Amino acid sequence: MAESAPEFAPRNPGAQLVDPALLPFLPMLYVAWADGDLSPEEMTAICRRLGDDCQSLLGPWLDPEQPPTAVELQQMLALIRQRTGELSAREKLTLTGLGLRLAQADDRQVSGEERQALVEIEEALGISGYEAARQMLATRRPAEPVEEVEPAFDVRAMQRLLDGQDHELRERLRRFLSRPELRRRDELSRGEYRERVLGWCRELAAEGFGALSYPTSCGGEDDAGRFIAVFETLAFGDLSLLVKFGVQFGLFGGSILSLGTARHHLRYLLRVGRLELPGCFAMTETGHGSNVHDLETVARYDPETEEFVLHTPHDGARKDYIGNAACHGRLATVFAQLEAGDDSHGVHAFLVPIREEDGRPSPGVSIEDCGEKMGLNGVDNGRLWFDNVRIPRLNLLDRFAQVAADGSYRSQIPSPSKRFFTMLGTLVGGRVSVALASLSAAKSALAIAVRYGSERRQFGPSGEAELKLLDYLTHQRRLMPPLATTYALHFALDDLRSEYVASSDLDRREVETLAAGLKAYATWHATETIQVCRECCGGQGYLAANRFADLKADTEIFTTFEGDNTVLLQLVAKSLLTGYQHHFGQMNFLGLVRFIADQATTAIAELNPVTTRLTHETHLRDREFHLGAFGWREQHLLATVARRLKKRIDDGMETSRAFIECQDHLMATARAHVERTVLASLTAAEESAADDLRRMLGLLGDLFALSRIESDRGWFLEQGYFEPSKAKAVRKLVNRLCREVRQQAVPLVEAFGIPQELLAAPIAR
Amino acid sequence: MAESAPEFAPRNPGAQLVDPALLPFLPMLYVAWADGDLSPEEMTAICRRLGDDCQSLLGPWLDPEQPPTAVELQQMLALIRQRTGELSAREKLTLTGLGLRLAQADDRQVSGEERQALVEIEEALGISGYEAARQMLATRRPAEPVEEVEPAFDVRAMQRLLDGQDHELRERLRRFLSRPELRRRDELSRGEYRERVLGWCRELAAEGFGALSYPTSCGGEDDAGRFIAVFETLAFGDLSLLVKFGVQFGLFGGSILSLGTARHHLRYLLRVGRLELPGCFAMTETGHGSNVHDLETVARYDPETEEFVLHTPHDGARKDYIGNAACHGRLATVFAQLEAGDDSHGVHAFLVPIREEDGRPSPGVSIEDCGEKMGLNGVDNGRLWFDNVRIPRLNLLDRFAQVAADGSYRSQIPSPSKRFFTMLGTLVGGRVSVALASLSAAKSALAIAVRYGSERRQFGPSGEAELKLLDYLTHQRRLMPPLATTYALHFALDDLRSEYVASSDLDRREVETLAAGLKAYATWHATETIQVCRECCGGQGYLAANRFADLKADTEIFTTFEGDNTVLLQLVAKSLLTGYQHHFGQMNFLGLVRFIADQATTAIAELNPVTTRLTHETHLRDREFHLGAFGWREQHLLATVARRLKKRIDDGMETSRAFIECQDHLMATARAHVERTVLASLTAAEESAADDLRRMLGLLGDLFALSRIESDRGWFLEQGYFEPSKAKAVRKLVNRLCREVRQQAVPLVEAFGIPQELLAAPIAR
């Protein structure tokens, strides 16, 4: 470079710029200038405090017009460090003490006036002299690898508890998923990714995982609970595989199982379970997703030929977002309005061939690829149009309603509303499964973020190693409540699964409500948890290799599919209002309004003026207090929303309008109900667990309950359920519990039992 | 299909199953059975109320043992509908009235006993007879295209107001971005996408957009404000392009501009602005992102050769995540610890060639591709290692510190702490830009979701068209407060930009604090808004074509880069604690502790017991009330956190430990400060706007302020700033304001001025 040097006169870097007489004052002078922010007035004020001798010594160094140069400051610091020698940064010295030490090391005498000046300047600086001295001497120490504290519980026993009775099955699946060939795609094209996912699905089918819920006569084990356990565990891996698996074996096969009869089972299920017959669950239409009742695809019966004629009357009625439709599906369970003669019998399910063996669409069927999605691009979602497609009469899935050859209709469920909801009951299994899968995804995210936070260091006190991220309160505040909630939800979803398995297709209203509520709660929890985990991993979390990209994008739709969360929570609230006596939907006004009247007079437990003020820890960590608060909130919200609805309906407002006006209140009621359920499940699990696990679950339960109470304290305060002092005590305790859980965070995520190969995130290793 | 028919005896579908004598009772019978949930006890109870004649007529139809068949119910409904003829579903008839109408139409007499039975049964059903009747007669009506209400303001004038003085520049850029060739990638490989983005960047450079902030002597306009306006507008388009543009012209070019001297400007900036010299901003290391002070790359001065020797001492010190590094960058601004002789002078910036003309890494430089990221895959992020790479002495960007040929060091900023933060001040422009860009992304998301919600219909009262999503309170609750916040933030960020432009490199502490706070607030706002908008668009929002995939994935890192939000908010709080007198960082204890003492004695305005109870709308919508509440909250949080810190420090706790213990409190303080600032900006904009715009901004301001107050009502109640009655009144009013803003939501998003071509989402058209 031939450019001229900048114009400045270089000083001799070796020159001694600082008079040794200044030694005892160096620490203060350095501190006064190094921060660079002492105002001229402050300098002058310090100067005025000094005696004459000191003023003549220090004056030139306290002149705002002539600050020390960068090099002079550098030399001051070098001198201080050099003379203090091996003085540890940990030794507690004020600036005055440090100054005296410097003088002593140099055999320089310090006069009485100087001593007093030292004390006065230090005071004038208005700082912590200890800390200033420490910072001056400190150099950053490298971090030594520190072991996290010992687990306070048996990690393997916790994993066994979480795995439950299907432990062996889950272990088998974990081994299956740990195979290197099931590792996530690198840069596959969408087409290649879809084929790979299909291949993986076939392997799962070959191992018998797909057919678990089917009858033994159809190659299965007749065990819906084990099927769901597989789905839950599968969710630790590639989520396109999960969804493809769910579409084929759960939705498509499940619809044949639940809505069809033996004839359909024998004819199809063996091939479905082996993935020899890939299929679709074609319910959603472009114009109707949540509102299944108003689907527009028509299945008109033609008694001449004993066929149904499937037809898409307009583009808005095309089947949309149908998994397996774009590439692989050959048969579809199609939901359509059954018409026979002059009668319309509402939505029913039909088996419709959509693709020939050679892969071309069947006659009358048009298929379009939905194209690129935010995530789950290994699943081939597509759109279907039917142009007067004829199918045999017996392709009606006729478990709950039959059409005879002459077109006459019969159903063992006379009420059209009840029939509709019974058929929709097939969706409940999907909701249970999605809730569990979303929690598995949240577990993966937490496992990555907790491990990273227990290794990654940034900032920290001077003179020490940087701190682990997990040792910051902000980090604990962001990760520990979701960790506690994840444990709580685990047990709630486990209970849900059991209740689902124990319920019958004909009567599962309570399970339906619970599934709707927990699906909404768990999937939102997953979305939020994965988000906060990504943020807690900073830029590392943004690299695809660290898994959050897929976790976020793939689970994003969980809050929407298998029932939009907002719609589901409103169904939960309606179900609560009718005391589970009535189905969700248009026709449920019957008992509803009557029940509202009852509810409105139901007395809510009176507040106890003593407990609203209690703030001691024993009370705040009493599970009875938590359950009481959650229960009171639910009852109060329910009674008040009932009153508000009744008032509007009594005033002549349409029910649907009244519901819209109270929607926010209904949502709050549903959420309160779900949270109470979750806490109850965790409490039950806690009570039956071994000692060390019980203590951990107790701690997690406290954090879950209190962090929820804290975040809803606005409501509790509004209702007078708390005094402000109690709300503040809860906040403080949540901070403490976050710190406590943080100590066990690493073993707690280890107990999720996610194999290293499945986490597949470099930062989690 | 050769299978046997199911075994059931088909009835004659034409047969009349229902006795016409039942006519007046049909509506009730249908309702009683159709919902499918009347208990046997209820049936019997109804039966008991009937007189003998009625009992013999109705008894068989009220027998729980023998419910009507599906076909009989179907016929009942058909009969009712057929006989009521053109009776409108809107006509208000109870079930009794409907029954009488049916009898009348058939000339059937109704006896007194029957009349009474009708009334009694209807009562026993315990339902709204009007609604039951309505639902029975109703069939879903198709939606007619309904125009949204007229805009209540001049949409173009609003856009002009939002565009501000750079309107023409923005329009030019909008036209540029609307070119079809700048449409989003379809299925480009990562490599192709990166090349395309580079090409777009070149086109922008050719139009002079890149160099706007550079001196006129270097091809620019010396106008940082216009450069930022370009960045903000660019964020309506492809965000990889935005970030590539920002890296090249903002960070890389900006560092040469701010940290270098005329010599560097003349030598490089012209080529940087034309993208003839692509470059990098290499600050972040794998081991140190937020904590720049402790970076580990070393630049040791060698006086023998008058060179700096850049070296990466270990893998954790490699430069990481550096935009433009993986493929295109040729020169990099590298931040490293400057060492000369025995002295270490802290972090400085150096220009280091990293890639030859032919694309190979320069000698001693190793480059690695960061690989696939969650988003922004059109930007080539990479890692850099330096193995004793020698650069000329004059490659030190020496505006704030110089090294002479002999290695002597000089700086016009003697304080090392102040020097460090002045150099870091180059990041402020980036933070301002990112904040604005994130808001543009939120605007795109809102524009798509609001338009979709104003067209999409789902569910609704029977007998009517389905309702638009935006007419549901839940939907309003989710979208309207973010819309209001987006408007408020727009003006706050506009003010920030002006203050940034007006500030000098040597003194921009208040701007730095504001930029840190608003960057955190705006980017979190964008993440949350885009998320809720996606959810509000359901499955459609998940299709890549509808843009949320890219909006979400590309903006995800905004909360992390240019300063992690959590770290930034803590810096804001520290800055507030020191009254802006001290810089963020390790060495700022000086004034801090002193200021804490002052703060702790600062009196917070006393609460007025009257206003804590006021609940009337005039008060609740009074901007003075909002500003007062926001201001009081900020002051109160600041004073109390100061007291808590002081107590800990007085008790001998290290400052850094004390800060960690109060981190949640510090975050709340910073947020409160930012929100107050945002509201103040909106209020100022409102006051100077034309009448119709002022009214709209007033409404949006009310919703912003009150929805924030509502969401923080737990805190206000804890402090006694509100009575519970007031908190409830706020909640109710927020619902009403959501409805009001919804009426104008479509024109409000139109005023963002995002060209249709840029929205590029089918569901937004």
Image (cartoon, coloured by chain):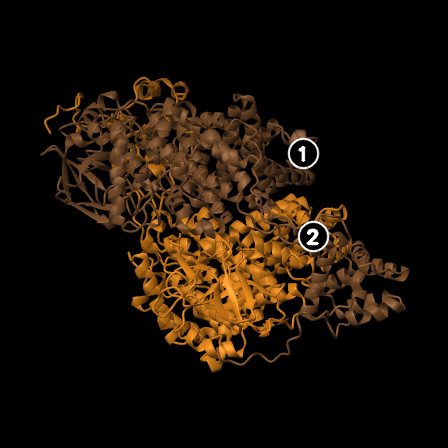
Chain colours: A brown, B orange
Residue B386: give x, y in percent of width and height. 46, 61
Taking depth in this image into account, of B281 and A94 the one nearest to the observer is A94
Taking depth in this image into account, of A183 and B6 the one nearest to the observer is A183
Residues at circles 1 and 2 in contact by the CB criterion of under 8 Å: no
Residue B530: give x, y in percent of width and height. 44, 53
Q: Which residue is mark 1?
A: A612
Residue A295: give x, y in percent of width and height. 28, 41
Q: Residue furthest front?
A: B304
Circle 1 chain: A
In front: mark 1 or mark 2? 2
Taking depth in this image into account, of A90 and A245 the one nearest to the observer is A90
How dense is the environment of label 1, judged by Cα within 10 Å: few (below 14), some, or many (20 and up)? some
Image quarter where the C terminus of chain A lies is: top left
The alpha-carbon separation of the residues under discs 1 and 2 comes to 25 Å
> Quick one: SS at disc 2?
helix
Q: Which residue is mark 2?
A: B636
Which numbered marker is on residue B524? none
Res A709 seen here: no
The quadrant holding residue B403 is: bottom right
Res A513 seen here: yes
The quadrant holding residue A273 is: top left
Position of residue A584 relative to residue B451, above or below, is above
Taking depth in this image into account, of B285 and B357 the one nearest to the observer is B357
Residue B74: give x, y in percent of width and height. 26, 31
> Quick one: SS at disc 1?
loop
The disc labelled 2 sits on which kind of residue?
A: His
Q: Are marks 1 and 2 on the same chain?
A: no
How dense is the environment of label 2, judged by Cα within 10 Å: few (below 14), some, or many (20 and up)? some
Position of residue B7 relative to residue A354, above or below, is above
